[in-house]
Amino acid sequence: NAGVTQTPKFRVLKTGQSMTLLCAQDMNHEYMYWYRQDPGMGLRLIHYSVGEGTTAKGEVPDGYNVSRLKKQNFLLGLESAAPSQTSVYFCASSLRQRPNSPLHFGNGTRLTVT
Amino acid sequence: GENVEQHPSTLSVQEGDSAVIKCTYSDSASNYFPWYKQELGKRPQLIIDIRSNVGEKKDQRIAVTLNKTAKHFSLHITETQPEDSAVYFCAASTDFRNTGNQFYFGTGTSLTVIP
């Protein structure tokens, strides 16, 4: 049981380049999330998904797109990277249950845009 | 949307002393409050959580209290040890049946335990 796995772990992009971050979970969780973490700003929600084929915007969605074609995978795309997107990106997942269940995080992807 | 404020941003304590981190939230619909610990370069990991129908929860040296009326909750760490040094995040979550559980995080507290 690997939990939540993110790839890649590190990436350096030039302004204008594109890339996709992959998140995979093997816990059969319905909900999946993408957060970015910046110094002094905590974790901010980019996009999330409540199930296969569904996505929704979070607090800071601009410049990002997501897809959830399979329940276990949640992809985050940057179409045209900007220096402001330099950050650490965390994927997380949780069960759909009552009451709420906690988030389980991946190990993060450190992205630098030059 | 929900707004979670966390204080202090940094905290230094002597080994063996207690540490208290406080958070406030704005949305009275929030009903689940987890705390995460993040060591340098690692993922956030859940250390304790509390639901809105409970006022206090304890797990060994860690306790969390919740005051729904005042909309604040606190993390208490007793008998601190150097390995408690990390960044701690509070979060508030509202359970929406059709739109998922949205989590809103505080900005973090960097705790240093001085040996």
Image (cartoon, grey):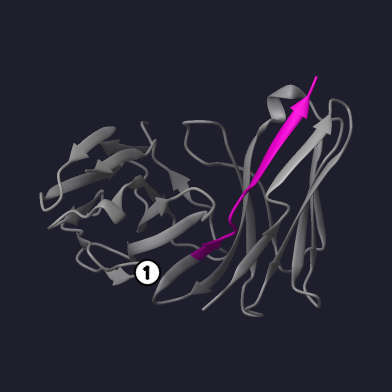
User: x and y percent of residue B49 in the render?
Assistant: 67, 52
Kindly identify the residue that appears in the image at 84 percent across and 25 percent down: B15
User: x and y percent of residue A64 in the render?
Assistant: 22, 62
* Nearer-the-camera pick, B12 or B44: B12
When the figure is inspected, residue B36 is found, relative to residue A107, above or below; the finding is: below
When the figure is inspected, residue B83 is found, relative to residue B31, above or below; the finding is: above
Answer left or right for A77 relative to B22: left
When the figure is inspected, residue B58 is found, relative to residue B90, above or below; the finding is: above
* Nearer-the-camera pick, A114 or B67: A114
Q: The residue tagged with tag 1: helix, strand or loop?
A: loop
Q: Amino acid at mark 1?
A: Gly
| Residue A34 can be seen in this image | yes
Please tell me whether residue B114 belongs to the stretch shown in magenta: yes
Location of the C terminus of chain B by quadrant is top right
| Residue A8 can be seen in this image | no
Instruction: Give the crowd class for mark 1: few <14, some 14-19, many >=20 residues within 10 Å.
Output: some
Q: Which residues are magenta?
A: B103-115
How many marks do you count on the picture?
1
Kindly identify the residue that appears in the image at 30 percent across and 71 percent down: A56
* Nearer-the-camera pick, A3 or B103: B103
Kindly identify the residue that appears in the image at 53 percent across and 31 percent down: B40
Please tell me whether residue A83 belongs to the stretch shown in magenta: no
Kindly identify the residue that appears in the image at 54 percent across and 66 percent down: A98
When the figure is inspected, residue A90 is found, relative to residue B12, above or below; the finding is: below
Q: Please report, as a chain letter, where disc 1 is located.
A: A
User: x and y percent of residue B88 in the render?
Assistant: 64, 44
* Residue receiving disc 1: A58
User: x and y percent of residue A22 in the render?
Assistant: 22, 44
Q: Main secondary structure of the magenta part?
A: strand
Name which quarter of the figure residue B13 lies in. top right
* Nearer-the-camera pick, B33 or A42: A42
